Image (cartoon, grey):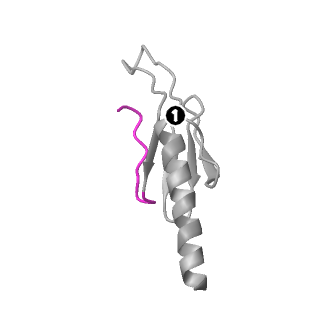
Amino acid sequence: MIIVVFIVIWLAFIITDFTLSKYNKKPIFAIPVFKLKDGGTVEYYGLGYKVIKYNVLDDPQMGQIGRKDTVFGFWTLEYRKNK
């Protein structure tokens, strides 16, 4: 019974943070671990998942266009400056 309660709570965490990432909001239940110096991108780690909230600035000299979105995935999700 206790295992079922933990699984339901874990799924609530995942569903909540996944929904927030779809609306480009920062997660509630994941912890910020890395803040990158590309304009303010933050990597959040949750229980078995990762959220990257991109805030990449434009860099005309490098020909890069900024990125402002949120990506949800497993812990193996990699940072990518461009979409």
Picture residue at 53% right of the left edge, 73% below the top: 7
Give percent across and percent down for residue 47. Answer: 55, 65
Judging by the rendered image, the residue that carries numbered circle 1 is: 24
Q: Quadrant of residue 9?
A: bottom right
Q: Residues within 10 Å of mark 1 (few under 14, many from 20)?
A: some
- Residue 54 magenta: no
Work out whether 3 lies above or below 61: below
Farthest residue to the top: give it.
60
Give percent across and percent down for residue 6. Answer: 59, 75
Picture residue at 57% right of the left edge, 59% below the top: 13
Residue type marked 1: Asn
- Residue 75 magenta: yes
Q: Quadrant of the C terminus?
A: top left
Tell me which segment is drawn in magenta.
Answer: 74-83
* Disc 1 element: loop
Secondary structure mainly formed by the magenta segment: loop
Q: Quadrant of the N terminus?
A: bottom right
Picture residue at 44% right of the left edge, 42% below the top: 71
